[in-house]
Image (cartoon, rainbow, N blue to C red):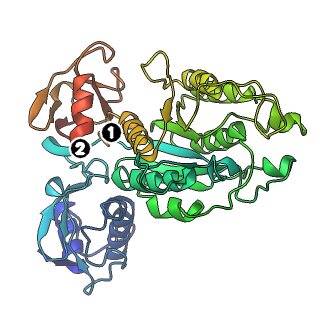
């Protein structure tokens, strides 16, 4: 049913028992339309804009004008907000919200009293990719590798592989994870044996956002770029990523994925040759504090890291340093070590392994927290299903398989799936939840 603004005003007056003739102090037609416009802007437009553009609402960017503009949403009741919401797709079909496929639109909550069975979607984490664009990622010959594990094909640069894998990652997980990216060193870094090789932009290269693939690919050097220069200022790169994540909602899970092909150098306050030839111990403090103080873990990924101790020579790399061992330590500091006791970080020797590692990390980073939008529910009346299977209520997420409220004492505005239930949610990406509105 397509309503005009006049239909809306008339319906509101009937439901709210308002007289047609407005007296002193009464709500006017203009007041009603203003409130309707505000609700569209605050509730409906963000929902639609986050739904991959698969659906649209007629005139959703046009103010309601009495007697002219179509008004397709919603049937309203006094004080209960949206009770019925219909979206119209490009073919003209009408979809009630619970039937819409809004994988990345967050929960589609039906407001109003009573029982509502609604499909909810897990909340996507905020993740910054901290990417090594030092000169060693493209240097000839050490910056090239057998990307496809086929000696019959020409090798490509490590940066080429990383760029390709980032594109795949942000395509495959772009709807489930809010990605951002930061480069170390800056694209303005030089090959000089000075601090000019260590500069890192103070602002995030690409801010975290939903469906952010295009912005990230536009913000990092091209796949075929072989002019990358600079040292390995990992600590400075991670600091910017942490500072950016701390500006985002702390209730949404946050993480860093660090990808590097070398040992950290470019320590703050150091000068050449120590600037390059001495390992930067501060990176362990930076990564460790991000995890233990700010609750931001770091996944550590190595690109072609050999388990050897470096020589003592002026070559721009930390002397007498086993990068493999130091990255193992860094992975533990970051709170996301692999279970393999001999290799705590994700070491990769070709593009195939790099893609597999980042895919595994992305799957692990997916959250099993589902926001319920409203805390005004009867806590004992909630039921949860994943892929058609009922999930039991539990009281200890660390030892039990099931679901529990993130705040057991209230407000009951989100649930967490635990154990095998969390794994099932990550596979299907959604849960059917029945709630009883107060």
Mark 1–mark 2 CB contact (< 8 Å): yes
Q: Residue at x 22, y 27 (%)?
A: 421
Measured Cα–Cα span from mark 1 to mark 2: 8 Å
Q: From this viewpoint, is residue 368 visible?
A: yes
The total of numbered circles placed on residues is 2
Q: Is residue 96 above or below residue 431?
A: below
Q: Is residue 87 left or right of residue 336?
A: left
Q: Nearer the viewer, residue 193 or 3?
A: 193
- Please tell me which residue is depicted at 49% across the width and 37% down the height of the picture: 254
Which residue sits at x=42%, y=19%? 339
Q: Nearer the viewer, residue 43 or 343?
A: 343
The answer to whether residue 268 is seen in the rendering is: no
Tell me where residue 69 appears, x and y as whole percent: 27, 83
**Residue at 54%, 38% in the rendered image:** 256
Circle 2 is placed at which residue position? 120
Sequence order check: which comes first, mark 1 or mark 2? 2
Secondary structure category for the residue under label 1: strand
Q: Is residue 111 left or right of residue 385?
A: right
Residue closest to the far front: 152
Helix, strand or loop at label 2? It is strand
Left of 331 or right of it: where is 278?
A: right
On the image, numbered disc 1 is attached to which residue?
371
Q: Is residue 423 shown left or right of residue 262?
A: left
Local crowd size for mark 2, using a 10 Å CA cut-off: few (<14), some (14–19), many (≥20): many
């Amino acid at each position: 049913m397509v309503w005009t603004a006049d239909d809306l005003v008339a319906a509101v007056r009937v439901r709210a028992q308002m007289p047609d003739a407005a007296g002193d102090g009464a709500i006017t037609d203009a007041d009603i339309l203003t409130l309707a416009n505000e609700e569209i802007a605050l509730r409906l437009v963000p929902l639609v804009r986050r739904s991959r553009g698969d659906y649209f609402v007629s005139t959703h960017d046009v103010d309601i004008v009495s007697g002219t503009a179509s008004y397709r949403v919603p049937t309203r009741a006094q004080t209960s907000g949206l009770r019925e919401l219909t979206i119209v797709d490009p073919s003209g079909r009408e979809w009630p919200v619970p039937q819409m496929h809004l994988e990345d639109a967050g929960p589609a909550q039906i407001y109003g009293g009573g029982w509502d069975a609604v499909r909810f979607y897990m909340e996507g984490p905020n993740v910054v990719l901290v990417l090594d664009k030092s000169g060693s990622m493209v240097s000839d010959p050490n910056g090239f590798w057998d990307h496809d594990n086929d000696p019959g094909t020409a090798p490509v640069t490590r940066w080429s592989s990383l760029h390709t894998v980032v594109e795949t990652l942000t395509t495959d997980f772009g709807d489930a994870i809010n990605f951002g990216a930061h480069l170390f060193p800056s694209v303005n870094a030089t090959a000089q044996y000075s601090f000019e090789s260590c500069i890192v932009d103070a602002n995030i290269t690409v801010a975290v956002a939903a469906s952010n693939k295009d912005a990230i690919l536009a913000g990092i050097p091209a796949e075929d770029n072989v002019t990358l220069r600079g040292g390995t200022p990992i600590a400075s790169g991670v600091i910017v990523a942490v500072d950016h994540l701390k500006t985002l909602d702390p209730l949404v899970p946050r993480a860093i994925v660090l990808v590097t092909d070398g040992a950290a150098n470019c320590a703050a306050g150091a000068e050449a040759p120590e600037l390059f030839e001495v390992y930067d111990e501060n990176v362990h403090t930076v990564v460790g504090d991000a995890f233990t103080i700010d609750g931001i873990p770091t996944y550590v990924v190595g690109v072609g890291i050999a388990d050897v101790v470096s020589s003592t020579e002026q070559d721009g790399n930390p002397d007498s340093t086993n990068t493999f061992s130091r990255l193992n330590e860094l992975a533990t500091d970051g709170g996301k070590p692999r279970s393999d006791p001999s290799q705590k970080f994700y070491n990769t020797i070709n593009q195939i392994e790099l893609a597999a590692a980042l895919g595994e990390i992305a799957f692990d980073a997916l959250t099993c927290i589902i926001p319920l939008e409203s805390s005004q529910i009867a806590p004992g009346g909630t039921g949860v299903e994943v892929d058609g299977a009922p999930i039991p209520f539990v009281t200890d997420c660390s030892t039990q398989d099931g679901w529990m409220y993130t705040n057991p004492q209230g407000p009951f505005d989100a649930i967490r799936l635990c154990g095998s239930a969390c794994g099932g949610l990550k596979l299907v990406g959604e849960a059917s939840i029945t709630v009883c509105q107060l």
